[in-house]
Image (tube, grey):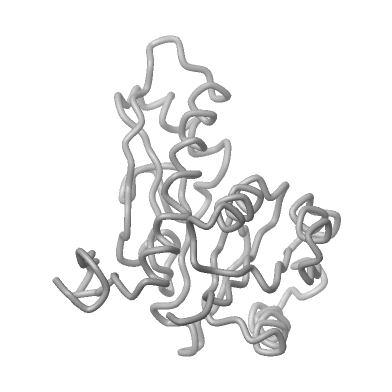
């Protein structure tokens, strides 16, 4: 693209991934601009992080919109108002409807290697607890395109993280989060550069824009 990709971020928590994205953009690593941050919870830390950078930030509390269609009406109203071209779900704990407009233009970050330890109910700390309880030797992080199912769309990038014998939920989470901080900016950069092609359920990454 000849100009930065206009990114809208949806979150529900402290926004550490958002902070990392801001820093990578400011360092010139990602040809994008965060133009809107929406939270499904009032008082989410991510809203304050956006506010400190002058980025429009708004809470649309899920509990005030029990009807999922009405909730998404509010989300899409703001996304359209701010000219968002691409959506990043960074710890967003509510359903997001693509509604055609964002098909192939919305990504989610998940703290495990999809298709393992994913789906409804698997988020945040719960994922790492499940990994340790199962005795898995590997976990990791995944960035994937969003579709109409939880943690299901075509996978863009993944990074494995070894599970150590002495791991706690906190120590494992810290290393997985470090992997997420590398994968998220990479995925957005690849999209902005036109290097992603979805073929069925597989994402092909071109060597450079317009070429295989």
- At horizontal 29% and vertical 70% (from top left) the residue drawn is 195
Instruction: Give how far across and how far down residue 197 sits, in percent.
Output: 25, 74
The answer to whether any part of residue 204 appears in the image is: no
* Rendered-image quadrant of the C terminus: bottom left
Q: Is residue 110 found left or right of 193 in the rendered image?
A: right
Q: Is residue 83 left or right of residue 151?
A: right
Q: Please name the residue shown 40% across and 43% down the image.
A: 141
At which x and y percent is residue 153? Answer: 35, 66
**Outermost residue, top side:** 166
Q: Nearer the viewer, residue 155 or 57?
A: 57
Tell which of 108 and 68 is nearer to you: 108
Q: Classify residue 50 by image quadrant.
A: bottom right
Task: From the viewer's side, name the closer residue of 123 and 28.
Answer: 28
Which quadrant: the N terminus?
A: bottom left
> From the viewer's perspective, is 199 left or right of 184?
left
Measured from the top left, where is residue 175 in percent x and y? 47, 29
Examine the rendered structure and indicate whether residue 66 appears above or below residue 103. Answer: above
- Residue 199: % across, % down: 19, 75
Residue at image position (34%, 44%) is: 113
Q: On screen, 135 above or below 139?
A: above
């Amino acid at each position: 693209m000849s100009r930065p990709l206009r990114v809208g971020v949806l979150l529900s928590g402290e926004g550490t991934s958002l902070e990392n994205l801001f820093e990578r953009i400011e360092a010139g690593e990602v040809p994008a601009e965060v133009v809107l941050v929406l939270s499904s919870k009032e008082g989410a830390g991510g809203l304050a992080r956006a506010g400190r950078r002058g980025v429009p930030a708004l809470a649309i509390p899920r509990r005030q919109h029990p009807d999922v269609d009405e909730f998404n009406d509010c989300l899409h109203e703001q996304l359209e108002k701010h000219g968002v071209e691409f959506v990043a779900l960074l710890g967003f704990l509510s359903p997001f409807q693509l509604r055609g407009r964002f098909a192939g233009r919305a990504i989610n970050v998940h703290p495990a290697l999809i298709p393992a330890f994913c789906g409804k109910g698997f988020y945040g700390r719960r994922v790492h607890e499940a990994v340790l309880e199962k005795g898995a030797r590997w976990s990791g992080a995944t960035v994937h395109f969003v579709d109409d199912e939880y943690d299901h769309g075509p996978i863009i990038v993944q990074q494995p993280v070894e599970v150590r014998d002495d791991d706690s939920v906190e120590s494992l989470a810290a290393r997985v989060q470090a992997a997420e901080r590398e994968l998220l900016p990479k995925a957005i950069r690849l999209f902005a550069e036109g290097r992603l092609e979805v073929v069925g359920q597989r994402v092909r990454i071109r060597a450079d824009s317009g070429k295989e």
